[in-house]
Image (cartoon, helix red, strand yellow):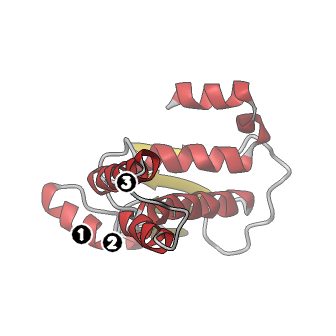
Amino acid sequence: TTTTTTTTSPGKHKNNNSGVNLVILDARPWKAAMGNSVMGKGTENIENYKGCKLEFCKIDNIHAVRASLEALNTLCHKAVSGEEDVRSNASTTWLTELEATKWLHYQSMLLHSAEKIRDYVTKGICVLLHCSDGWDRTAQMTCLALVLLDSYYRTTKGFVRMIEAQ
């Protein structure tokens, strides 16, 4: 599944003098894309597309993100149940454990990817998003980019519309 992001606000675009007309953002890490090619889920040969650029966003698959969320939930449960005191000197340990869940890393990667989309679109460059299946990372990146690009999606009505579209 492929998702294309555009903005509904013409006139806000800068001139695109880069010679690049289309950026393909592959949500996967490069190694994962190459591994997926064995199953017929490879990536584009960019030499076949004039004026096109390919970038990998390095976001791990849903299984890694799910494991990260489960680790975060376990860690937070410890803090809420009193098993771990996050207010004492032990909070340094808690913060280390939080980092080890990689949850904040994954959120950072999604936000960074959405910022890339926003930056390209506001420069007048089309963006095509994809990954191996297109049902998790691409939807997240698209929705975050829409929120960054168009204030309508920052309203309750717009946010609901965006969620329904996904």
Quadrant of the image occupied by residue 83? bottom left
Tell me residue 41's x, y (percent): 23, 55
Left or right of residue 30: residue 99: right
**Does the CB distance between marks 3 and 2 fall below 8 Å?**
no
Q: Who's the residue at 80% across and 43% down the image?
A: 9
Residue carrying label 1: 34
How far separated are the C-alphas under marks 1 and 2?
Answer: 6 Å
For residue 92, say whether it is visible: yes
Tell me the quarter of the picture where residue 45 sits.
bottom left
In percent of width and height, residue 140 lies at 50, 46
Distance of mark 3 from mark 2, alpha carbons? 40 Å
Q: Earlier in the sequence, mark 3 or mark 2?
A: 2
Marks 2 and 1: in contact by CB < 8 Å?
yes
Who is closer to the viewer here, 121 or 67?
Answer: 67
Q: Which residue is mark 2?
A: 30
Q: Nearer the viewer, residue 94 or 150?
A: 94
- Nearer to me, 71 or 146: 71
Q: Residues within 10 Å of mark 2 (few under 14, many from 20)?
A: some
- Could you tell me the amino acid type at mark 2? Trp
Q: Residues within 10 Å of mark 3 (few under 14, many from 20)?
A: few
Residue depicted at 50% across the width and 58% down the height: 107
Which residue matches tag 3? 83
Which amino acid type is marked by label 1?
Met
Percent across and percent down for residue 158 are 70, 29
Q: Residue at x 78, y 41 (%)?
A: 151
**Element assignment for label 2:** helix
Dot 1 falls on a residue whose secondary structure is helix
Q: Quadrant of the N terminus?
A: top left
